[in-house]
Image: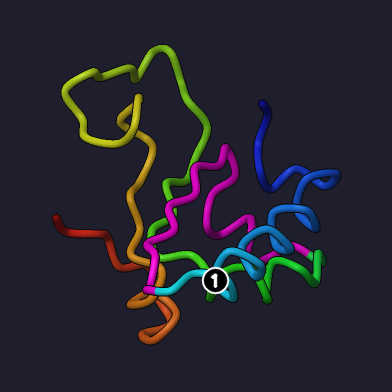
């Protein structure tokens, strides 16, 4: 459990994603849920973040906030959280929300 981007987890998550992609016979879609916002990740001095983001297809960012809880939202639990298309975001240099 815990946030995959927490300092003690990030190197392991990066290694796991690299290994899965190397061993996979067909492309896989990687979704990652984190309590950090995309902006916090971008501003971080953690060098692994820069390597990890291109391996993610969809990033669900932001902390769960009980006061903004909404069980009708797909893939997230509170209204402040975003479902971000990471490939398009990295290509365009600004947050692009994922569309189903």
Farthest top residue?
67
- Identify the residue at horizontal 52%, vertical 57% (top origin): 38
Residue 40 lies, in percent from the top left, at 63, 55
**Residue displayed at 55% across by 42% down:** 34
Q: Is residue 40 above or below residue 28?
A: above
Looking at the image, residue 79 lies above or below residue 69: below
Q: Residue at x 69, y 48 (%)?
A: 5
Pinpoint residue 30: horizontal percent, then vertical percent.
44, 58
Q: Quadrant of residue 85?
A: bottom left
Name the one closer to the observer, 72 or 15. 15
Query: Which residue is disc 1 drawn over?
Result: 21
What residue span does the magenta drawing correspond to? Answer: 26-44
**What is the quadrant of the N terminus in the image?**
top right
Residue located farthest toward the bottom when viewing the structure as drawn: 91
Which image quadrant for residue 69? Answer: top left
Residue at 66% in and 67% down: 19
Q: Is residue 77 magenta?
A: no
Tell whether 36 sits left or right of 28.
right
The foreground one among 90 and 16 is 16
């Amino acid at each position: 459990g815990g946030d995959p981007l927490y300092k003690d987890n990030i190197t392991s998550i990066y290694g796991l994603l690299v290994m899965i992609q190397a061993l996979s016979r067909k492309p896989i879609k990687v979704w990652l849920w984190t309590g950090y916002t995309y902006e916090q990740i971008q501003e971080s001095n953690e060098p692994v973040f820069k390597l990890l983001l291109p391996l993610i297809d969809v990033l669900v960012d932001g902390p769960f906030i009980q006061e903004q809880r909404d069980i009708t939202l797909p893939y997230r639990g509170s209204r402040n959280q975003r479902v971000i298309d990471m490939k398009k975001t990295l290509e365009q240099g600004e947050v692009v929300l994922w569309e189903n």
